[in-house]
Every structure is written in structure tokens, then in C-alpha cells.
Image (cartoon, grey):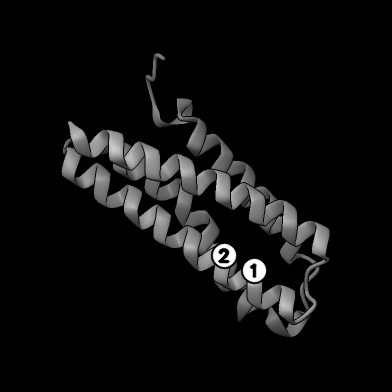
Amino acid sequence: MNINTYRDLIVWQKSMDMVKHIYHATKRFPEDERFGLTNQIRRAAVSVPSNIAEGYGRNSTQDYVRFLRMATGSLYEIQTQLEIARCENYLAFESYDNIANLLIEIEKMLVSLTKKIAKH
């Protein structure tokens, strides 16, 4: 595997897909949630690929691992916020399920990448 930039990382690519799904799904949230849950979940979603990219650009393995862990933390935030949205019936079950499965996939990839980077 030849990785020249963070854009070559599949976990970053999948995170960008997740952001698109989150933005699409949150467009259907109630207007009164625009500055609440909608904003919160979008910010957490954007944080995932942003932290992957920022960590990649650091010149330190320790910093890279720290940013990957922040990205993982943002995923947990999104999982919690999606659960709240589902409980409030802001999301159809199918939409929730699709995004939740993507989050699990990204989480596994981030955990694996973090362990791999931390070993070096």
C-alpha cells in the first residue's frame, strides 16, 4: 500500500462519506434543532476526517496517534447524538442503521490504524 497523503487513507475517505451522509440526514431534522443537535452532530462529523488529516500532517507519531484518538472520540459523540436523534424520531430507522454501520466500520479502521501507528 502506497500512501502519499491523508487523502489516500481509506479511513479518511470513508469519514468524508460519513460527513455527506450526516449532512444529508440532518437536513430533515426539525428547524428548532438547527443550532442544537443538527449543529452538534455536523461539527462532530466534520471533526473525524479533519483530525485524521491534521494528525497525518504532524511530524510526530505521538501527535498522529493523539489526533486519531480525537477522531475516534468524535465518532463516539456522533454515535450518541444519532441515538438521541433516533429516539426523537428525527431519523428513519434505515437512515440511522446505514450511518451507524458506517460509523462502526470507521471506528474499527481508526482503532486498527491507531494501534499500527502507535507501535512505530
In x, y percent, where is residue 53?
Answer: 39, 40
Which amino acid, by three-letter code, is at mark 2? Gln
Residue pictured at 67% horizontal, 49% vertical: 20
Checking the image for residue 79, the label placed there is 2
State the image quarter where residue 34 is shown: bottom right
In the displayed structure image, the side of residue 113 where residue 35 appears, left or right = right
In x, y percent, where is residue 49?
Answer: 47, 46
Does the residue at mark 2 contact the one at mark 1 (Cβ under 8 Å)?
Answer: yes
Disc 2, SS: helix
Q: Where 84 falls versus 4 (above or below)?
A: below
Residue pictured at 81% horizontal, 68% vertical: 28
Near mark 2 (Cα within 10 A), the count class, few <14, some 14-19 or many ≥20, is some
Check the picture and name the quadrant holding the N terminus.
top left
Disc 1, SS: helix
In the displayed structure image, the side of residue 75 where residue 28 appears, left or right = right
Residue sitting farthest toward the bottom: 32
In x, y percent, where is residue 48?
Answer: 46, 52
Check the picture and name the quadrant holding the C terminus.
top left
Near mark 1 (Cα within 10 A), the count class, few <14, some 14-19 or many ≥20, is many
Q: Which residue is mark 1?
A: 82
In x, y percent, where is residue 29?
Answer: 76, 73
Of residues 42 and 73, the one nearer the viewer is: 73
Residue pictured at 55% horizontal, 35% vertical: 13
State the image quarter where residue 95 is shown: bottom right
Q: Where 88 falls versus 52 (above or below)?
A: below
Residue sitting farthest toward the top: 2
Which amino acid, by three-letter code, is at mark 1? Leu
Q: Where 5 falls versus 114 (above or below)?
A: above
